[in-house]
Image (tube, rainbow, N blue to C red):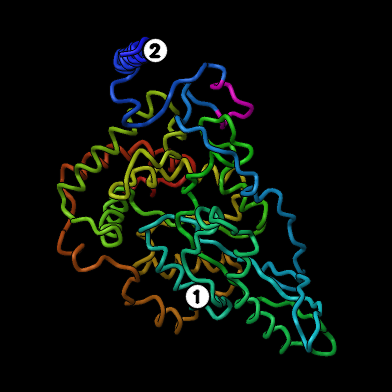
Amino acid sequence: MSKNRRWYVLLWMVVCGMWLVCVPLIRPGLFTKLRWTPVGPSLAISRDELCYGKGFRPFVNRTLRPDWDLMTTVPYKMLPNFKNPCFLQKVTKWVGGGIKSQQKLRCLPYFFIIGFPKSGTTDVWHRILRHPDVVSGNNGKELMFFNRKRFYKNRSFDHYIRYFDEAAKIIQDVVSSATCESHLFPYHHLITGEASVDTIFDNKRWSQLPGNQGCNEPVITTADFLRHVMPDTRLIVVMRNPVERIYSDYIYEGKILRYNLSKADFHEAVLKAISNHEDCRQYFTERGCAYNSSLETYKARLRVGMYHIFIRDWLRVFPWEQMLFIRTEDLSGENAIKTYQRIFRFLQTRPFTRVEEEKYLRHKRRMNARHKEGRRLGDMLDATKRILTNFYEPHNVALVKLLNNDRYLWK
């Protein structure tokens, strides 16, 4: 063996020995489980109180992506004679052998169901669409632009606006048919919306967004971007008992990800997720852990039920009057009528008539309900339910204080 090779082997042995000795002293399993690395205490003091931590930061140094910064988007000037946020945009098209410019009506959603998954949002979305003042066009549920698709290659905000072009045509046609001599541009009350229920919490790319560099948790969230491009949109948040929500989520994702459903498997997934969150809290804030999706799998998305953390971030950006909070448990039975009356008051539309209530609300089967295999599985283990109830109790208490409504204790 050559002299240089012996030195290389010796150096490698020293490095490996230091790794084996030092890692357990810091935290057993820390880097294998959570993949974080310690930093100096200076980074714990941030330029904004939302940026702080406990002396650790993500192990991977992600590349900053200014092209994802929606804050650079120039807000559109909305037309005052439309209730829905609509604007005119100059477009060019090939007409009669030449290029001509014309004004095209473009629209953005008047309302947005931003959360939470497996809480009855599909039901709410389709019931709202039954209202004669609401048009959908080709914009369906789960567009997932703000939390996911805008990070795809060559995706701009204009791609999002295109989802609402069909709705804009419907609005435009109705406006055109309502013109008369005294009102050339009459006010139009039709509205459109969208529902992407992971939007409120899903923020995996936050560390790559301008404004969050060097932070242990996000300063700029999806709420900030949405507020910038759609400042007047109305947000609907549907919340279910988090214990029931996470189990329903496990069953639903099993059909998509094709894992075998079992009560024992769900129990183990919950224990692992809770253990990871407890480890995380040794080094990060509760909020920082809630924005770390690597702590859990789709089998037990524990952080989704920490409602107060995400809602607080949205209320930091949007005024209270632009947000409506609903319990899943109030979407059925006699409560359903009162709940949808609240929804339509919030949307500033007329309520359902008695005939519409009977047709769309009473005795109607819930949409996106549990599939046959999930129904056969039955309820979760009693032990799992006790563990989850204890875990979520302080989060529910925090939610009650935030919303000033003790019905969110789910007792």
Which mark identifies residue 4? Answer: 2
Residue 410 seen in render = yes
The residue lying toward the viewer, choosing from 114 and 396, is 114
Q: What element carries label 2?
A: helix
- Judged left or right of residue 261, residue 244 is right
For the residue pair 195 and 217, the one nearer the viewer reads as: 217
Residue 380 point in image, percent of width and height = 18, 51
Residue hosting label 1 = 129
Spatial separation of the CA atoms under disc 1 and disc 2: 74 Å
Relative horizontal placement of residue 272, taking residue 118 as reference (left or right): left
Q: In the visual, does 115 lie left or right of 103?
A: left
Which stretch appears magenta?
Answer: 43-51
Residue 41 in picture, x, y percent from top left? 52, 16
Q: Does the magenta stretch include residue 134?
A: no
Q: Where is residue 323 in the image (x, y as percent from the top left)?
A: 56, 54
Instruction: From this view, report whether residue 307 is shown above or below residue 77.
Output: above
Nearest the viewer among 123 and 94 is: 94
Observer-side mark, 1 or 2, equals 2
Is-magenta flag for residue 44?
yes
Number of marks present in the image shown: 2
